[in-house]
Image (tube, rainbow, N blue to C red):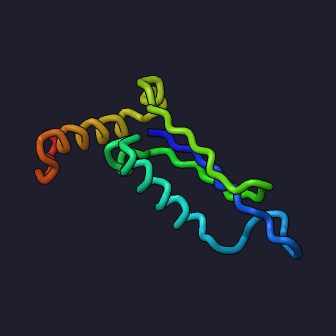
Amino acid sequence: LHVEATFYLRRPKRGAPIYPVRRPDLDKLTRGLLDALTAASVFGDDAQVVDLIVRKRYAAEPRVEVSVETLDHESLEELTPRELVRLLREAAREMEGGDRKPRPAH
């Protein structure tokens, strides 16, 4: 999945820099957002997110704008053959229970 989010925070009344470089931390905002999206069944597990773009900005009205997109097969065309094989092996392990160690290549 590809997730893109912008957190808009209320600008302090005075002395604010151009960007919100103070708390809350972007990583904590992101973790909360991904947990909320999982709880709302937008996706099954935030481990499915492979692309993540997040921003923190000031705005008159605080809000979060978020988009979630599935990655189609065209995204796989950008992978090297080695990366593609690794992804396919990981997917096969997850489908079989996830705890098995990969077999050595012959």
Total number of numbered discs in the rendering: 0
Image quarter for residue 19? Answer: bottom right
- Describe residue 21's horizontal placement relative to residue 16 as left or right: left
Q: Which residue in the rendered view is the most extreme toward the front?
A: 61
Q: Residue at x 49, y 34 (%)?
A: 69
Say which residue appears at 35% left-offset and 38% top-offset: 82
Which of 67/14 is in front? 14
Which percent across, then down, holds residue 96?
12, 41
Residue 56 vertical position relative to residue 92 in the rendered view, above or below = below
Please indicate whether residue 81 sits to the left or right of residue 100 in the image: right
Which part of the image, by quadrant, shows the N terminus? Answer: top left
**Going 59% across and 64% down the picture, which residue do you hit?**
26
Quick check: 57 above or below 105? below
Image quadrant of residue 50?
top left
User: At x 36% / y 43%, what residue is drawn?
Assistant: 41
Point out residue 38 in the picture as x, y percentages from the top left corner.
38, 49
Q: Position of residue 73 (x, y in %)?
A: 41, 24
Q: In the image shown, does 35 or 40 lie closer to the viewer?
A: 40
Judging depth in this view, the residue of 100 and 79 nearest the camera is: 100
- Where does residue 20 sit, x and y in percent of width and height? 74, 66
Where the C terminus falls, by quadrant? top left
Q: Is residue 54 left or right of residue 94?
A: right
Camera-side residue of 55 and 91: 55
